Image: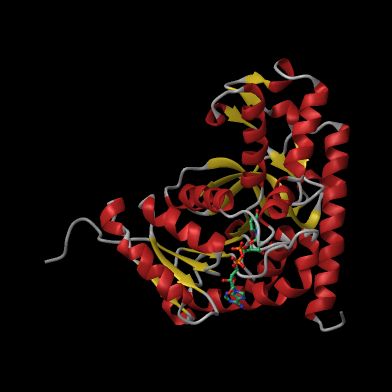
Amino acid sequence: MSSPIPCYLPRVTIVGAGRVGSTLAQRIAEKNLADVVLLDIVEGMPQGLALDLMEARGIEIHNRQIIGTNNYADTAGSEIVVITAGLPRKPGMSRDDLLKTNAKIVVEAAKNAIAHSPNAIFIIVTNPLDVMTYLAWQATGLSRSRIMGMAGVLDSARFETFIALELGVLPADVKAMVLGSHGDLMVPLSRYATVNGIPITELLDAATIERLIERTRNGGAEIVELMQTGGAFFAPASATSVMVESILLNQSRLLPIAAYLQGEYGLEDVVIGVPCRLGCGGIESILELNLSDSEREALQTSAQSVRRNIERSQEILAGKL
Ligand code: TXD
């Protein structure tokens, strides 16, 4: 006799079981959101991590399955695919320096994953983020609502953290939105940042806000410099899990997401961070804010730098660089 309640559990594949990927697997399982398939090219490593996470289930009190694999066949039928495969930055490197190594890895991962999960929604995490999202969009042929990059949620969380530390308030009470590319040219919108609805411009002077914006822009590099081996992964995994959750639970959260633009903000054929509503269909809509001249100019500059790197990436993939 069939059960009246569908015993169906969503499945999230994470390609790249490194620091971000494995921490994301932990977040997803422990939030009880979905079963997880962790895939990496290193043999044994994702299997070991999956077993370790499975052995924590009794203590953390959840029943999600975590599978480790080196084989894309095991990822079949995933609702969401997250790509974190690729190299992280070393001290002194910019995210763009990773273009050559990571372009081929992300294109290959995207093609392999879509072949086994044709209905999945893709979230790209690998740097340089905006370009990698563009390449994965190109490689999969997915509609733009179903492929996106994670960066703005992390950059906004960093900005919110620094505002909260400065004011001595609960970080969750601070709301901010950082748009643009994931790099030095990101566009933190300070006039939209609030503490429980109170604009930070009423709480902090202009010089202090500028200092916090600078620290946000440098947020990833600050951690790379301190750690020397690899970069941030706890907050990146948290930020990605928020996107996974908004899709799986159809929350329609309004989040800054790296999306393929077709005329929004006057930008065409480029991926960049903009406010999007994120639900079970992926990107449900893109919100066009009424930006000031300087904000619009900053977004344009940010998009131009992504576009230059997209052009470089096409030459790299064609074997010309
Ligand atoms: O805001 C953001 N978008 C980011 C992006 C925040 C933090 C990290 N960001 C980027 O994510 C970072 O610059 C890297 O490009 C990726 C992954 O960072 P992570 O810190 O997790 O790097 P690791 O620990 O080196 O893990 C990468 C894994 C590693 O286990 C490799 O063996 C694997 O990727 N890898 C592959 N897996 C599958 N297939 C292929 N081809 C492959 N190549 C490497």
Pinpoint residue 62: horizontal percent, then vertical percent. 29, 54
Instruction: Depth check: give the residue in front, 300 or 188.
Output: 188
Q: Quadrant of the N terminus?
A: bottom left
Q: Quadrant of the C terminus?
A: bottom right
Instruction: Depth check: give the residue in front, 294 or 203.
Output: 203
Q: Is residue 282 above or below residue 99?
A: above
Q: Which residue is pictured at 38% across the width and 49% down the height?
A: 31
Left or right: residue 305 versus residue 200 is right
Q: Which residue is pictured at 35% across the width and 52% down the height?
A: 32
Q: In this rendering, does residue 197 appear at all? A: yes
Pinpoint residue 80: horizontal percent, then vertical percent. 49, 62
Q: Which residue is pictured at 64% across the width and 22% down the height?
A: 167
Count of picture labels: 0
Q: Is residue 108 above or below residue 128?
A: below
Residue 51: image quadrant is bottom left
Q: Which residue is pictured at 81% across the width and 30% down the height?
A: 210
Work out which residue is located at the far left of the displayed protein and give it. 1
Pinpoint residue 45: horizontal percent, then vertical percent. 47, 75
Q: Is residue 88 above or below residue 177?
A: below
Q: Quadrant of ligand 1?
A: bottom right
